[in-house]
């Protein structure tokens, strides 16, 4: 019954915002097209389609807002004007009652927040679709922020996800471009995002890992501050962390009034991003201005502060090498190498002609190099490549979609801080240094040092392990079979030789006997 009423509301909201016009343009099924033509009403809408879709999602509630945000990252699948508008969706909703927040904390931690904490602020400081945040003070005097999951969110999400799955199946069957858009895969990706964000222990673990990557012993603490996790006050529904004080990165007037060098801040933001991607393979993938602050405290003035760790990206060594080589090839305008990398990675069918792919890549990249470097968007270049790749049946990896979305966020934030920011010039030396350390003698030495401990244990065992493997009947069956054949052949040869020798012995014996008789 819930699904029926929810579906009715979705259809009603879609008609109110004239999304029928958006749907009709993509329907291929004649009967479905005729039915939608019947319910269509009024004059053609004047408001752009992306704006109408954004407003409809906002009216349908926080889960649909979240879905729109995730969909905005898939610019390889949806029209650019729609993606840009969906990126404006704000994940801000009215807070739920403080009594419910206190009850959730008590249910999760076994005591009232007014007992657990020396002071607990009743009014939340921030509220979003998944959770809201309250400030508190521990009994040892530390200031903390307590993130509380919205009550009943799991049930709401499961029902809305089930409905989205049904709608995605309809889109795939009825829309002319349904299969290419992969709606069911997009919903499955959204499902993963939401369930990750629903587990606040997972978010706390992400926070802890990122903090470790920028700890003092790494020499990077001057670039980024990450709150400390207070693990004894964390569960799947509660996340307690160190309270951070700073200015939102988008508040330019306040940053300048605090004496912060915004141009240097823009350069550091790019450095932090590439450091997370290529050095760590683990990056904050939700770096919009609401999640990035800048410290205004005297002891840490001008340092970035990262918040909200529900969405992070991870890259394998293969991904990092592939991306670094691609970026460097772009910088050097070596389009043939870009085409080779796509084919070598396996993301393009092996039958693809290098020359054809090289020409497509050149058509994407070359126009950008005729502009001043400060006007070139690396994120837009990557986006255009993803869009061009449709022709060649490239399977866009989810981690690269997250990366492209984050890169666009970083570029937008950097250019707001410094309109003359040259992302290419800032990134190129870092990438070249990283590649040298990875594939040069320095990289070989570091890899040997990294593996030395393991090798020191394995080397003495090699003779025993080789003997054990060779002794197993299952090891190299062909070799054992060949050795068995050789053994049987040798036995037959030995028997033949023995027979011949016996005959010769008899012959010699007869000859000697005959001679003695003469």
Image (cartoon, rainbow, N blue to C red):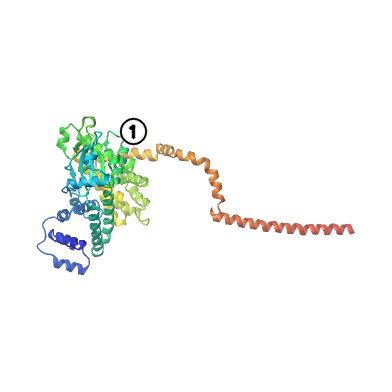
Residue at screen point 49% across, 42% down = 458
Residue at mark 1: 217
Q: Nearer the viewer, residue 251 or 225?
A: 225
Q: Nearer the viewer, residue 500 or 125?
A: 125
Query: Dot 1, how many residues are within 10 Å of its Cα: few (below 14), some (14-19), or many (20+)?
Result: few
| SS at mark 1 in the image | helix
Q: Is residue 12 left or right of residue 336?
A: left
Residue 516 at least partly seen: yes
Q: Is residue 106 above or below residue 137?
A: below
Residue at screen point 57% across, 50% down = 471
Residue 414 at least partly seen: no
Among the 4 quarters of the image, the one containing residue 144: top left
Q: Is residue 487 left or right of residue 113?
A: right
Q: Position of residue 401 (x, y in %)?
A: 28, 50
| Residue at far top of view | 298
Q: Position of residue 447 (x, y in %)?
A: 42, 39
Image quarter where the C terminus lies is bottom right
Q: Is residue 47 above or below residue 334?
A: below
Q: Position of residue 148 (x, y in %)?
A: 23, 45
Q: Position of residue 55 (x, y in %)?
A: 15, 54
| Residue at far right of view | 518
Image quarter where the N terminus lies is bottom left
């Amino acid at each position: 019954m819930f699904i029926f009423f929810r579906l009715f509301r979705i259809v009603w909201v879609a008609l109110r915002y004239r999304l029928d016009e958006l749907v009709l343009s993509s329907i291929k099924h004649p009967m479905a097209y005729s039915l939608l033509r019947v319910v269509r009403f009024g004059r053609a809408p004047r408001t752009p389609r992306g704006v109408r879709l954004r407003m409809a999602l906002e009216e349908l509630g926080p889960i649909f807002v979240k879905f729109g945000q995730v969909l905005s990252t898939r610019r390889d699948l949806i029209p650019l004007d729609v993606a840009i508008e969906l990126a404006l969706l704000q994940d801000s909703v009215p807070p739920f009652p403080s009594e419910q927040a206190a009850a959730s904390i008590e249910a999760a931690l076994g005591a009232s927040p007014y007992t657990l904490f020396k002071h607990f602020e009743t009014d939340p400081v921030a509220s979003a679709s998944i959770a809201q945040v309250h400030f508190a003070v521990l009994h040892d005097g530390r200031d903390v922020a307590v993130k509380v999951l919205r009550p009943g969110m799991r049930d709401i999400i499961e029902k809305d996800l089930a409905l989205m799955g049904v709608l995605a199946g309809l889109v795939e069957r009825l829309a002319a471009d349904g299969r290419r858009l992969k709606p069911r895969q997009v919903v499955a990706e959204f499902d993963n995002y939401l369930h990750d964000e629903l587990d606040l222990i997972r978010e706390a673990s992400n926070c802890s890992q990122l903090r470790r990557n920028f700890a003092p012993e790494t020499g990077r603490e001057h670039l980024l501050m990450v709150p400390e996790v207070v693990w004894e006050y964390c569960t799947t529904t509660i996340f307690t962390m160190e309270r951070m004080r700073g200015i939102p990165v988008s508040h330019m007037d306040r940053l300048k009034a605090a004496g912060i060098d915004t141009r240097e801040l823009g350069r550091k933001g790019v450095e932090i991003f590439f450091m997370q991607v290529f050095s760590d393979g683990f990056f904050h993938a939700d770096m919009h201005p609401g999640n990035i602050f800048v410290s205004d405290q005297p002891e840490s003035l001008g340092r970035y502060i990262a918040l909200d760790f529900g969405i992070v990206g991870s890259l394998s060594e293969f991904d990092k090498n592939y991306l670094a080589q691609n970026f460097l090839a772009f910088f050097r305008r070596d389009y043939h190498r870009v085409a080779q990398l796509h084919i070598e990675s396996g993301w393009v069918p092996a039958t693809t002609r290098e020359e054809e792919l090289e020409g497509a890549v050149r058509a994407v990249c070359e126009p950008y190099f005729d502009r001043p470097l400060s006007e070139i968007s690396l994120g837009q270049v990557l986006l255009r490549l993803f869009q061009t790749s449709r022709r060649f049946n490239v399977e866009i990896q989810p981690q690269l979609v997250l990366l492209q979305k984050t890169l666009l966020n970083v570029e937008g934030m950097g250019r707001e801080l410094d309109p003359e920011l040259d992302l290419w010039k800032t990134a190129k030396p870092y990438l070249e240094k990283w590649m040298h350390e990875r594939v040069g003698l320095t990289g070989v030495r570091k890899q040997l040092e990294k593996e030395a401990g393991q090798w020191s244990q394995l080397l003495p065992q090699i003779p025993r392990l080789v003997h054990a493997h060779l002794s197993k009947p299952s090891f190299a069956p062909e070799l054992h079979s060949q050795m068995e054949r050789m053994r049987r052949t040798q036995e037959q040869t030995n028997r033949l030789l023995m027979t011949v020798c016996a005959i010769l012995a008899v012959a010699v014996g007869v000859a000697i006997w005959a001679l003695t008789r003469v």
